Amino acid sequence: MRGYNVMQGYFNNSEATEETIDKGGWLHTGDIGHLDEKGNLSITDRLKDMYISGGFNCYPAEIEQQLVQHPSIAQAAVIGIADPRLGEVGAAFLIAAANAEDPASQTDDELMAWCKSTMANYKVPRKFIWVNSLPLNATGKVMKQELRKQLAQH
């Protein structure tokens, strides 16, 4: 964003200012969004939430929106995890839809095949973890650091 309402910089921190405000005066907020046909901005993700898989930028919010289109999935949260070949790949934490059959009967291979038919291969999560709930903060946002801790304990 840019305008009279944007800060001039961080107090006594020129390095942080240079990382956040470019030479053209644009403040880089780290938010990702899109403009609709009426010019309304919808914030959909955070840039820092992005991971890079095989050189491609992967935005978890986009992948999560696709995953919940599957009839067995009510909620999804995706994080990037280390991969020796691709750098990072997606790990999806999934909550089963109320009307879905037992998620344990849904094999990872079946779910992966569905994902490959609906999204680009580099976006397809390589690990699926079925959970009963996702850790949420007071505003209802998924705490992805907690998911990383849970995965480390697995």
Image: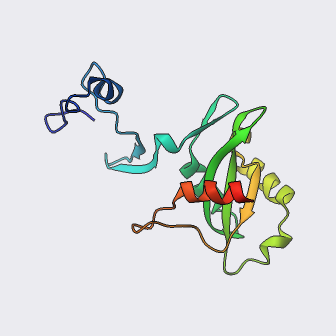
Judged from this view, the residue extending furthest toward the top is 23
Q: Residue at x 40, y 39 (%)?
A: 30
In the picture, the quarter occupied by the C terminus is bottom right
In the picture, the quarter occupied by the N terminus is top left
Judged from this view, the residue extending furthest toward the bottom is 99
- Indicate whether 146 appears above or below 124: below
- Indicate whether 130 appears above or below 102: above
Which percent across, then down, holds residue 100?
73, 77
Q: Seen in the image, is 8 located left or right of residue 141?
A: left
Q: Residue at x 34, y 33 (%)?
A: 28
Q: Seen in the image, is 34 located left or right of residue 151?
A: left
Which percent across, then down, holds residue 64?
60, 56
Which percent across, then down, holds residue 11?
19, 32
Which percent across, then down, holds residue 111?
79, 58
- Indicate whether 70 appears above or below 38: below
Judged from this view, the residue extending furthest toward the left is 4
Q: Is residue 50 visible?
A: yes
Give the colour scheme of this rendering.
Answer: rainbow
Give the quadrant of residue 88. Answer: top right
Q: Seen in the image, is 58 located left or right of residue 13?
A: right
Give the quadrant of residue 93. Answer: bottom right
Count the marks: 0
Give the quadrant of residue 24. Answer: top left
Q: Seen in the image, is 92 located left or right of residue 136?
A: right
Q: Is residue 120 visible?
A: no
